[in-house]
Image (tube, rainbow, N blue to C red):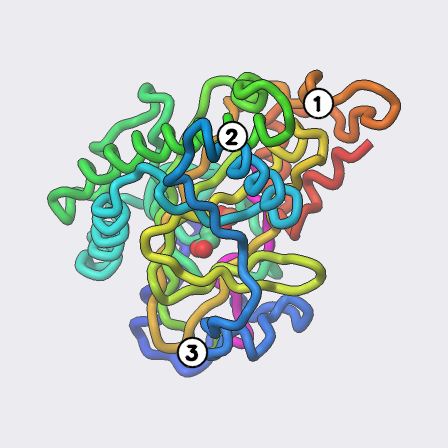
Amino acid sequence: MEDVGRPVRVQSLAQNRISTVPPQYIQPPDNRPKSSSTAAASTSSHSRTIPLIDLLHFDHFHSQSIRREIGRACREWGAFHVINHGVPIRLLKDMRSVGLSFFNDCDIPEKLKYSCDPNFAASEGYGTRMLVNQSDDTVLDWRDYFDHHTFPLSRRNPLRWPHYPPNYRQVIEEYSDHMKVLAEELLDLISESLGAKSSCIKEAVGEIYQNITVSYYPPCPQPELTLGLQDHSDMGAITLLIQDDTGGLQVYKDGEWVTVQPLSDAIVVILADQTEIITNGAYRSAQHRAITNANKARLSVATFHDPAKTRKISPALELIGGESSLPQYGEVVYGDYVTSWYTKGPEGKRNIDALLL
Ligand SMILES: O=C(O)CCC(=O)C(=O)O
Ligand SMILES: [Fe+2]
């Protein structure tokens, strides 16, 4: 049974070995994944996927071509894989492993000790529902998660994170530090790829607020009717995501959902809405979602890098000017943007589209 303060976790539904999903999880027909994307076809090596950018040779000699590749990936997809990114591969594995261990090895009552507050958006802890004030007809995601507040350091309190496995909190801290360094490097490269100064996007974002969300998608008896995570774009500046080998992340491109192949050593870079605003639409945030799997649980770890809630965001002056590039987006206080996202729901890119001038 569900009580208001404690929404039922999807993992406990899945553990009851139900053969059909409860009606609240059934997507309207237009949102359902195509059957080809829920079956083996989604891992076919022939399918189209996001660009892969190798940062290994990032030096004076190659840097121009890497910036060009990044520019193309941001313009055409808003998402790309990076390899040789400087984050230890061992740390990516440890992150996936401790995340999975919390979900698999702790029982539900133990996990519920870390429950987030479902009445506040993005509150820290163990949860399942992304949106606040959901009405009875809201379709639910087939997902549980654990959200960690990691930057600025004043928000970081490892005592609120799982105590099992024993290295959990240490891994999160190390992972958080590495991801922030990489996010800042990428924001520099993305700015340079537009011909702007390296710090252009970073200066517009200001102090970085980082959250790490470990998402756990239990096996789902009816993957053709459900979504692990509904269609959305991320609301902050840049998201760095890793996934396990189950696969399920999809990016919307040219009218179709394209599956992002799992690459164990790579990190998926996802441009988020504030970067779209700051770049005045030169780079668009990626619309994405997660599908479910009938046989296997899936784990992903998304690290969000966002402005402070009080920050005003608008197109960077360096990137507008002249008649050909008038500002395309109105100024927004980031906290207002977040409130609207969590109360109205993301529904594709409706929130950012509402700011178009
Ligand atoms: O699980 C995934 O691959 C997607 C997660 C995601 O998009 C998010 O947490 O915002
Ligand atoms: Fe996302």
Label 2, secondary structure: give it.
helix
Residue 263 in percent (x, y) is at 38, 58
Residue extending farthest to the right is 323
- Residue with the mark numbered 1: 319
Residue 125 in percent (x, y) is at 33, 42
Left/right of residue 182 with respect to residue 31 in the rendered view: left
Asked whether 234 or 191 is in front, the reply is: 191
Identify the magenta region.
224-236
Please state which of the two labelled residues, at mark 1 or mark 2, is closer to the viewer.
Answer: 2
Image vertical order of residue 284 relative to residue 275, above or below:
below
Q: Is residue 351 magenta?
A: no
Left/right of residue 110 with respect to residue 311 in the rendered view: left
Residue 189's label in the rendered image is 2
Asked if disc 2 is less than 8 Å from ligand 2, the answer is: no
Residue in view at x 22 percent, y 61 percent: 104
Upstream in sequence: badge 3 or badge 1:
3
As measured in the structure, the alpha-carbon distance from the residue carrying label 3 to the one carrying label 1 is: 48 Å
Quadrant placement of the C terminus:
top right
Residue 330 in percent (x, y) is at 75, 26
Tell me whether the residue at label 3 lies in contact with that at label 2, contact meaning CB atoms closer than 8 angstroms. Answer: no
Image vertical order of residue 179 relative to residue 80, above or below:
above
Disc 3 residue type (three-letter)? Pro
Q: Quadrant of residue 139?
A: bottom right
Q: Is residue 230 magenta?
A: yes
Asked whether 16 or 175 is in front, the reply is: 175
Q: Answer whether residue 130 is visible to the viewer in this image.
A: no
Label 3, secondary structure: give it.
loop
Asked whether 246 or 136 is in front, the reply is: 246
As measured in the structure, the alpha-carbon distance from the residue carrying label 1 to the one carrying label 2 is: 15 Å
- Residue with the mark numbered 3: 221
